[in-house]
Amino acid sequence: MKFGVLTGGGDCPGLNAAIRAIVLRSAQHGHSTLGFLDGWKGVRDNLARPLLPADVARIVGRGGTILGSSRTNPFSQEEGTRAVLETLSANGIDVLIAIGGDDTLRAANALHARGGRVIGVPKTMDNDVAGTDWTFGFDSASSVAVDALERLRDTAESHHRAIVLEVMGRNAGWVALATGLAGGADVTLVPEEPYREESMLGHVRAACDARGYALVVVSEGIDLGSKAGSTGGKDEFGHELLRERGVGAELARRIERSTGIETRSAQIGHIQRGGAPTLFDRILATRLGSAAVDLALAGRFGEVAVLRGAHVTGIPLAEAVGTSRLVSPEWIDLLHTFEA
Ligand code: F6P
């Protein structure tokens, strides 16, 4: 068999571990792998490089993706779809493994609907792919954010300030939730819970009264009740560029204005997406990449490898795309236990 592999959407730690797993698992069974460059763009424009076991031998702990990535959606136009099918046939690809988040997997599902043989591997620091318990990239990104929060604690305590940390996550609050819980924030704001300014200010005041400083974690996707900050800028899949909204900076302004407490904000942005994957992400990416090859060898095209509890299995791509997995009320309830 000849495997094709691509990494699409925002990069995250663990992608190289998944690529390595696909190449080595397929080689173990006597098959070869061709890597497409820059996500779906590489499949559409026929940009590829062979991936030999030696090429992936040392990449398990490397951040980013050796294949490059993009947010290209070739299926938005008929010529794009045709070009994808032509590239796959010209290169003799028997099955394509698409590693990505919701957008990339949706494109994979579109290919499946056109009769293409494709298997998905879910990844994203946002942790919002439906059908899987966790996505790789999330643990690494959240660990970076927790480290940032702990650094902010030192300076907030020294200067008796409030500090707001804005983290990524698109419309899901998983990264903010994990950062707030694991880093001990006084208040954590996620998009899944309606924003209540008085309550947020109450937590900040309580923390400052008790210890002289406060830490707030906010997810970039939160709705602060005004369209201010929205740029209208969108990516190829139609998602608003949330970073530009600057909700962390806006919150800091509101806190200082209402409480008189000196407040700063920090937006760590793409720092969360770089660097070496954590142990959890290396293992998860390795298991899912290997499982994708196994699904292909079993002829289970149109499926995506997922983590359910302690087990890795395959489910139809259609079940993983279209809806986002959001933070549930149970998690939000837990979060409130630890607020100031
Ligand atoms: O989907 C991953 C993610 O990092 C989101 O958390 C964030 O909103 C977005 O990508 C940023 O996209 P870009 O890298 O295109 O700026």
Image (cartoon, grey):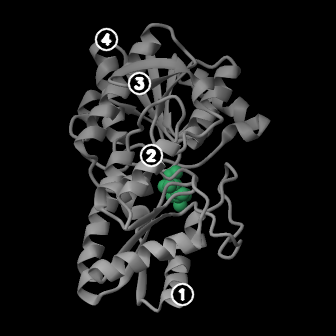
Asked if the residue under mark 1 is in contact with the one under mark 2, i.e. CB atoms within 8 Å, the reply is no
Q: Is residue 156 visible?
A: yes
Three-letter code, disc 2: Trp
**Disc 3 vs disc 2: which is toward the camera?**
2
Q: CA distance from mark 1 to mark 4?
A: 64 Å
Residue positioned 68% across, 71% down in the render: 231
Residue under circle 3?
308
Three-letter code, disc 4: His
Residue under circle 1?
258
Task: Please state if 280 lies on the left or on the right of 128 as rendered.
Answer: left
Question: Which numbered disc flags the more N-terminal residue, 3 or 1?
Answer: 1
Between 93 and 142, the residue placed more toward the observer is 142
Give the SS element for disc 2.
helix
Residue under circle 4?
29
Q: Residues within 10 Å of mark 2 (few under 14, many from 20)?
A: few
Q: CA distance from mark 2 to mark 1?
A: 29 Å
Residue under circle 2?
331
Question: Which numbered disc flags the more N-terminal residue, 4 or 2?
Answer: 4
Q: CA distance from mark 3 to mark 2?
A: 18 Å
Residue extending furthest toward the right:
78
**Disc 4 vs disc 3: which is toward the camera?**
3
Question: Which numbered disc flags the more N-terminal residue, 2 or 1?
Answer: 1
